[in-house]
Image (tube, helix red, strand yellow):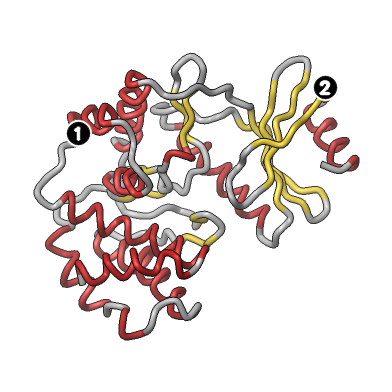
Amino acid sequence: MNTAFFNHITSVLNQPIINYAPVSGGDISEAFKINTAAKSYFLKTNSSGGALNMFQTEKLGLEIIKNTNTIAVPELVTCGNLGETAFLLMEFIETKTPSETDFKTLAEHLAKLHKTSADNFGLSTNNFIGSLPQQNKFHKHWTDFYINQRLLPQLNLAKTNNLLQDSEIPTEVRLKEVLTPLFKNIKPSLIHGDFWSGNYIIAKNGTPYLIDPAIYFGHNEVDIAMSKLFGGFSNAFYDVYQNIFSFDDFTETRIEIYQLYYLLVHLNLFGKSYYTQVKHVLNNNF
């Protein structure tokens, strides 16, 4: 953090900064813990093109989650830019390693979020999944939304990036043929959208917080699918969640298909190392 930026954040907080230090903030942005006499803050910065829009949609997502009164998010201070550097400033949450009880509470609070519904699938604004644009155009039917707003954009991007061949990409007709019977009777749920172990935290007092959302109204099982993609959570989490939202005979298949979206995102962000997993899910289902 250079002097000009330090002075700008000081003026935003309207209180002296005692010290600051880099902290882990993900693969995309730099992150800092800022300490003042009153409290600590978490600052994310990014100088890439479009970073301000990315932070603005993250801030909006956190505000929408907060307004549901279902699960906590960090208190937001502001979002803005200084020169070419965009930033997002919020309270810093002191964390702990989750216990079994904490996982149960996380499941209960996430399920409350998922009970927040709407008339259509999507969101009034587009946002991001990682650094990639995520489209959220409203659709009445989940099959149409998932094909047109999730799978096809990532499949087509992978083709453009020469990561998938045209012959490896199922047609829209084939996607609809497979997904329609699997996606019956699904109601819109407000979901986090990128729910892996790096995007929740447990505060010292046991309160679960969501961070880095990619929210929209989708199928609640999408969050469960993402939670299982890179190792999964405690069994206590899934046991409690399943007592609130029961799974059915197609859940396991849907989870693999929902993981395809995230695998495609990783393929497009990080390259060929995710090709084998993407190809496996495509061959297994389409």
The answer to whether mark 1 and mark 2 are in CB contact below 8 A is: no
Farthest left residue in view: 249
Q: Which mark is residue 18?
A: 2
Q: Residue at x 31, y 31 (%)?
A: 234
Farthest right residue in view: 3
For mark 1, give the secondary structure: helix
The crowd level at tag 1 (other Cα within 10 Å; few <14, some 14-19, many 20+) is some
Q: Residue at x 55, y 43 (%)?
A: 60
Residue 31 picture location, percent across and down: 68, 40
Residue 258 picture location, percent across and down: 30, 56
Q: Residue at x 35, y 32 (%)?
A: 110
Q: Residue at x 51, y 17 (%)?
A: 204
Q: Is residue 47 toward the left or the right of residue 176 in the image?
A: right
Q: Is residue 130 toward the left or the right of residue 102 in the image?
A: right
The crowd level at tag 2 (other Cα within 10 Å; few <14, some 14-19, many 20+) is few
Cα–Cα gap, marks 1 and 2: 46 Å
Residue 230 picture location, percent across and down: 38, 47
Q: Who is closer to the viewer here, 167 or 113?
A: 167
Amino acid type for the residue under numbered disc 2: Ile
For mark 2, give the secondary structure: strand
Farthest bottom residue in view: 167
Q: How many marks?
A: 2
Q: Who is closer to the viewer here, 121 or 47?
A: 47
Q: Who is closer to the viewer here, 111 or 160?
A: 160
Amino acid type for the residue under numbered disc 1: Gln
Q: Which mark is residue 242?
A: 1
